[in-house]
Image (spheres, rainbow, N blue to C red):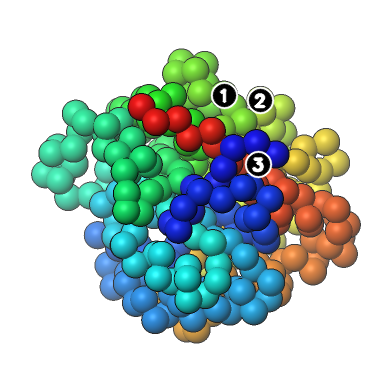
Amino acid sequence: MTGAVRTVLGDIPPDELGICDAHDHLFLASPALPGQELDDAGAALAELDAFAALGGRAVVQWTPWGLGPRAGELPGLSRRSGVHVVSATGLHQARHYDPDELRRVHGGLAGLFVRELTAGPVRAGLIKVAGAYHRLDDHARHVMAAAAEAHHATDAPIGVHLEAGTAAMDVLDLLCRTHGVPPRRVILGHLHRFPDTRVHREAAEAGAFLAFDGPSRAHHAGDWRLLDCLEALAGAGHTHQILLGGDTVTAAARSGADGPGMPFLLGGLRPRIERELGPRVASAIFVENPARAFAAGWRRP
Ligand SMILES: [Zn+2]
């Protein structure tokens, strides 16, 4: 396997990544989720420890610029838990930001992303972007153009929040056809929130990675279709493009509070995937696929 995964403690060979939660959050603060901030470092460490106790070795935090990723605290959490942590740059939907703050960075997004990916002390290893519901609005198009530019400058992978799992093909059309990002460098997130297996297969045939996440009360109706979605993709020959994450976005969803949290991925989902889809599929989803998805050549612009 070529390239390196850029963790908060430095670049590592992809085969050192190990069992990976490919989409989650240790810190997150958005005005769109008032009172639900992930801002407690002690709770973040407890969640990492619980994940590590079940064999978890790596977590990719998809919290983008401006939403409180607290990148400076991630190396300490990684060291103390022994879990590799990858952090993100990029931007979420406009509704997650103060409009003035957004105006201030609007013209220089690609440069901002490149700086966060390449300049220390803590470097990001992923560019996060977001679509809208069944469409891409002007904000999404602008941010994705900047993400593509930052990808071409650095080779960083691009992770996409698909709103309620929709607009997957619109995103691939924009990022790949218009802006020339190779599909295998794009990770489409939240696909089981819109469990249309035909669209999933189309996105997989285009060459993208497909990330599923949860469970969460916010998308309960998709959670119980997860295994069917994975089985359909694996059956169509796309086992090596599937990723899985916990996507814990609220304090209440943590295992130390009221939710399944990060450990459920390994304690709850992995045994079912091993039993129903086989250990080789489980190993691809939790180990080999994340290593390929997050590895990059890391050019320096
Ligand atoms: Zn997320």
Q: Nearer the viewer, residue 207 or 36?
A: 207
Q: Residues within 10 Å of mark 1 (few under 14, many from 20)?
A: some
> Mark 1 highlights which residue?
182
Q: CA distance from mark 1 to mark 2?
A: 10 Å
Reading the image, the residue beneath label 3 is: 292
Where 186 sits versus 281, above or below? above
In the image, what residue type sits under mark 3? Answer: Arg
Q: Between residues 263 and 57, which one lies in front from this camera angle?
A: 57
- Please tell me which of labels 2 and 3 falls first in the chain: 2
x, y (%) of residue 112?
A: 26, 37
Percent across and percent down for residue 34 are 27, 67
Disc marking residue 172: none
The disc at residue 206 is 2
**Contact flag, marks 2 and 3 (Cβ < 8 Å):** no
Using the rendered view, name the quadrant where residue 267 is placed. Answer: bottom right
Q: CA distance from mark 2 to mark 3?
A: 17 Å
